[in-house]
Image (tube, rainbow, N blue to C red):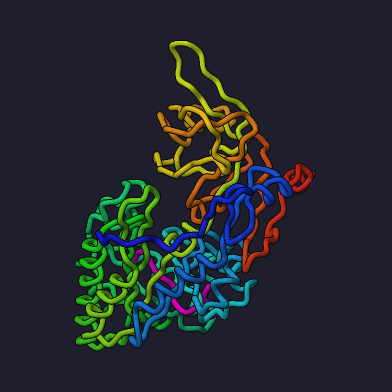
Amino acid sequence: MIAATTVTTTFVTTTQGMTIDGVPLAEIADRVGTPCYVYGAAAIRAAYTRFDTAFGSYPHAVHYALKANSTLEIVRLLKALGAGVDANSMGEVDVALRCGFHPSEIMFTGVGKSADELARAISLGLKAINVESPGELDRLDRLAQDQQRVAPVALRVNPDIDARSHPHISTGLKTNKFGVPIEAAPAIFREIQQRPGLEPVGVHSHIGSQIGTLDPLLRAASAAVDLAMALRAEGVGLRHVDFGGGVGISYDGTPAIDPTDYGTRLVEIARPSGLTALVEPGRVLVGPAGSLLTRIVDIKHFEGARKFVVLDAGMTELLRPALYGAFHRIEPLRPRAGAPMLADIVGPVCESTDTFARDRELPHVEVGDLMIVRDVGAYGAVMASTYLRRPLPPEVLVDAGQWRIIRRRQTLDDMLRLEE
């Protein structure tokens, strides 16, 4: 763990309340309503640049993982910075194409790709298809031969390394559903070489998300490079080694991995192979850049019971706390005078899991106050739902002191259109 500050959106408290890059957040909330998501473009640019430059002159590519946030303007922003794409569904592939990415800039990943998805991936000529199993290789080979094409394949290997993150987002153990055991990989690669519809181009490894220490990432990287070098010694013509993503961010102010140190160490590991180093960051590029604006709609407290601060945002706008107890900082936009309080911060959805925080200390707040939930740029809007027929909130991008809506608030008509 490195004592480093995550690149984040700059918030300043003024007489107008909290601002982002000079724009009052209350102005945005008053104009577009709450709940709504707000992103800082400057923070995304800074995070990407820091990650990219960490690899120096060594051949590398940064493929943004769209599953973190696939809103079109966010994806276009990262394309302008030089990113490639890691897509986990054909829907994400189509988003990348719509944003101007060339197929050769797109990696296609996913543990359960359908035959239709594989056939389209082959026809598009993507950079690589990250394959998960021998069965998927069989299907891919047949489909490629049907199209009289050769599909570029990277095999996802499972190094059985504990990412030491939440078990729901850990993917590198033998007990997880992802990839093939690394010890089985050499024989599978030899089989790939014999298939007329397949070309082996890389080794792929991804052991989890929100990883807070370098050790598991570096051990997985070393295992992938050792495998790649052994395969090349056998004559397997690989082009790259894909280290996946997983670098975490600091949600609570504790130290996080320094992307510069991470990139430098990966280059040291990759250099003996001479292979291009690929990485697939998502959360670390966009997570700290986004916030959720919400308003207090009720405060409940009865003798002998807990105090509840009820927001107009809930698990439909930010699922992470309900899904795996994730922590997010929550604070008022305009602090009030008065004694602090201890309360559960909850949403309006009729589920007890619709809870952002328990026993959280807050400054004095009142009904109607605007609140900000920090670090929701990743796995916020992209995991939102219309449960209870709640419309998806708008998204706003702040850039160079100006703000604009990049996705309007959903209406009931939008929601019902496919039913009518």
Name the residue: 53% across, 54% down: 12
Residue 158: image quadrant is: bottom left
Residue at the spot 33% in from the left edge and 86% down from the top edge: 58
Asked whether 130 falls inside the magenta stretch, the response is yes
Measured as percent of width and height from the top left, residue 103 is found at: 55, 79
Q: Residue at point 53% right, 59% down?
A: 69
Looking at the image, how many numbered discs can be counted on the residues? 0
Q: Nearer the viewer, residue 271 or 39?
A: 39
Picture layout, residue 168 above or below residue 160: above
Q: Which residue lies most toward the top here? A: 303
Assign the N terminus to one quadrant of the image.
bottom left
Which image quadrant: the C terminus?
A: top right
Q: Is residue 116 visible?
A: no
Relative to the observer, which residue lies in front, 124 or 397? 397
Q: Is residue 209 left or right of residue 265?
A: right
Residue 324 part of the magenta-drawn span:
no
* Residue 68, above or below 47: above
**Residue at position x 36%, y 60% from top?**
5
Q: Range of the magenta residues?
A: 121-133
- The picture places residue 139, in percent across and down from the top left corner, at 44, 68
- Is residue 220 at least partly visible in the picture? yes
Spot occupied by residue 166 in the image (x, y as percentages of width and height): 32, 47
Q: Position of residue 290 (x, y in %)?
A: 53, 55
Residue 151 shown left or right of residue 100 in the figure: left
Name the quadrant containing residue 124: bottom right
Q: Height in image: 373 above or below 110? A: above
Name above or below for residue 66 compared with residue 371: below
State left or right for residue 231 relative to residue 152. Answer: left
Report whether 280 appears left or right of 26: left
